[in-house]
Image: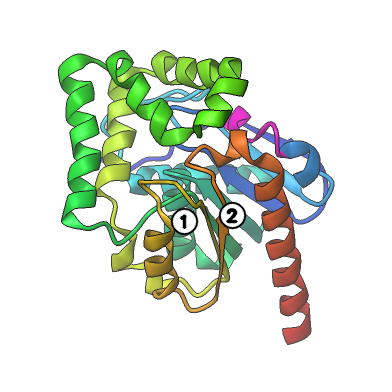
Amino acid sequence: MATLAVDCHYSITGSGPPLFLTHGIGAAEDAWRFMLPKLSKHFSVVTYDLRGHGKSSVTHKNFTLDELVLDLERIREKTKFEKAHFAGHSLGGMIAPAYALKFPDHVISVGLLSTVAGRSEEDSKKVWNVIKEMENNGIEKTLQTLTTRWFTDEFININPDLVKRRLKQVVDTDPEVFLNVFKIYAKTEMLLWLKNISKPCLLLTGENDGGCSPKHNKIMANEIKDFKLVILPKYKHSLLIEAPNEVAESLIGFINFTLKADRLRK
């Protein structure tokens, strides 16, 4: 099957240096809604729906990471931003660096948020067990598992409506698409190619994110030439919902530092 880009739905908010943001599994561009007020004061923020998510269509449901990268390049071409910052959360944190590897001339910096590389055999087994549970019992039956992996107990108790909304997004995603992107997340091993990324990278994760742990992020940092590592205390996986201000401030600080360093080099 030919590898082709899909025209994904996207939005541009704010003004300043361009920043492309890629959401994770079973989410949509509104994953960034709590961060946009801060980010849009500094950047032209491009958010979009991955193929098969939100308002974006899908041509076939067994697409690959490479195709998701081509979708992002299609959006960049449409926006006419020649060089930009790219960041992603979870699966999006795999798409952004994969894009930087394929299209380095368009990339100034990369943000890898709540993502993972260097999984042990046991780590991989845990992820694939969740996928098997979904395939055998249905995605809705695994929502409790996802909830405890993604959110802190405190947040679940205080913000049940936000948790329900996030889980509804999962349920509303086409099951074949959801399982496919989960499998892309499970089988992608960035450790094979992270060392080839020459752009400055922000590695950011929650202290208690079991799947995308500080341990994994330290392994990733050892592979990257130019990096900043940020571990946010107490949080788990859903940082865009639970810790949007901390994530936004980290991104702003990192990108501004990168831009300043770039100007000094010139």
Q: How is the image coloured?
A: rainbow
Q: Is residue 221 above or below residue 147?
A: below
Lateral position of residue 147 relative to residue 239, left or right: left
In the rendered image, which quarter is residue 200 located in? bottom right
Residue 266 visible to an observer of this rendering: no
Q: Which residues are magenta?
A: 29-35
Residue 111 image point, x, y percent: 56, 57
**Residue at which label 2 appears:** 86
In the rendered image, which quarter is residue 189 located in? bottom left
Residue 184 image point, x, y percent: 29, 42
Near-viewer residue (5 or 28) = 28
Q: Amino acid at mark 2?
A: Phe
Quadrant that contains the N terminus: top left
Callout 2: 10 Å neighbours few (<14), some, many (20+)? many
Q: Is residue 169 above or below residue 152?
A: above
Q: Amino acid at mark 1?
A: Tyr
Quadrant that contains the C terminus: bottom right
Residue 82 visible to an observer of this rendering: yes
- Earlier residue among tags 2 and 1: 2
Please tell me the numbered disc located at residue 99.
1
Q: Is residue 205 above or below residue 255?
A: above
Q: Secondary structure at mark 1?
A: helix
Which residue is at 54% across, 76% downward?
226
Callout 1: 10 Å neighbours few (<14), some, many (20+)? many
Which residue is at 51% across, 53% downward?
205
Q: Nearer the viewer, mark 2 or mark 1?
A: 2
Magenta span has 30?
A: yes
Magenta span has 5?
A: no
Lateral position of residue 264 relative to residue 87, left or right: right
Which residue is at 48% across, 49% downward?
114
